[in-house]
Amino acid sequence: MNTLRNKVSLIGRLGAKPEILKFDNGRMLARFSIATNEGYKNKEGEWVENTQWHNVKAWGKSAEYAAKALDKGTELAVDGRLVNSTYETKTGEKRYSTEIEANDFLILSPKKEQ
């Protein structure tokens, strides 16, 4: 039952090439954002597109693969968990953020021709 507690799965497109960070201890982190789209008709019968941006981070082997394989516009499925954090700005304001920590991802776009 633990796997049902904090799990998220999304399909979306990358907004930009992943940001890659390498740490002194050898660990690697990839950060990227994916966009999901939802469409609906409003009261006037007009079609409305709603785009949501989701921040994703991947560690270790997933980060290495993201650095090699992901590019702007790539469509992928992400499976992971939500991670909430708080931080304070230089002016003392408290801010909150939510990210998806990817356990796995699958590229859905066709491979680019070399």
Image (cartoon, helix red, strand yellow):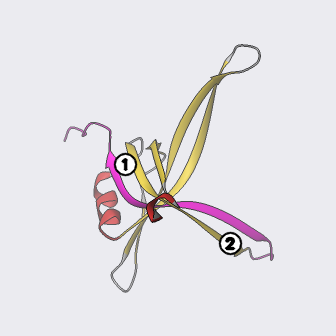
**What residue is rendered at 33% in x and 60% in y?**
67
**How crowded is the residue under tag 1: few (<14 C-alpha within 10 Å), some, or many (20+)?**
some
Residue 111 relative to residue 39: left or right? left
In the rendered image, the residue lying farthest to the front is: 1
Q: In the rendered image of this protein, does residue 66 appear above or below residue 37? A: below
Magenta-tinted stretch: 90-114
Q: Relative to 40, is 29 on the left or the right?
A: left
Residue at the (44%, 61%) spot, across then down: 3
Is label 2 or label 1 in front? 2
**Which quarter of the image is occupied by the C terminus?**
top left
Q: What is the CA distance from the residue labelled 2 to the residue labelled 1?
A: 29 Å
Q: In the rendered structure, which amino acid carries the disc numbered 2?
A: Thr
x then y, percent, for residue 103: 39, 61
Give the labeled residue for mark 2: 86
Q: Position of residue 46 (x, y in %)?
A: 69, 16
Asked if residue 99 lies in the magenta stretch, the reply is yes
How dense is the environment of label 2, judged by Cα within 10 Å: few (below 14), some, or many (20 and up)? few
Residue 107 rendering spot, x and y as whole percentages:
32, 45
| Mark positioned earlier in the residue sequence (2 or 1) | 1
What amino acid type is highlighted by mark number 1? Answer: Asp
Seen in the picture, residue 108 relative to 42 is either above or below; the reply is: below
Verify whether residue 51 appears in magenta.
Answer: no
What is the total number of numbered labels drawn onto the structure image?
A: 2
Q: Nearer the viewer, residue 104 or 91?
A: 104
Q: Which residue is mark 1?
A: 71
Q: Picture coordinates of residue 73 (x, y %)?
A: 41, 41
Per the image, label 2 sits on a secondary structure element best described as strand
- Most distant residue in the top direction: 45
Is residue 42 positioned above or below 70 on the image?
A: above
Instruction: Report which quarter residue 50 is drawn in.
Output: top right
The front one of 56 and 80 is 80
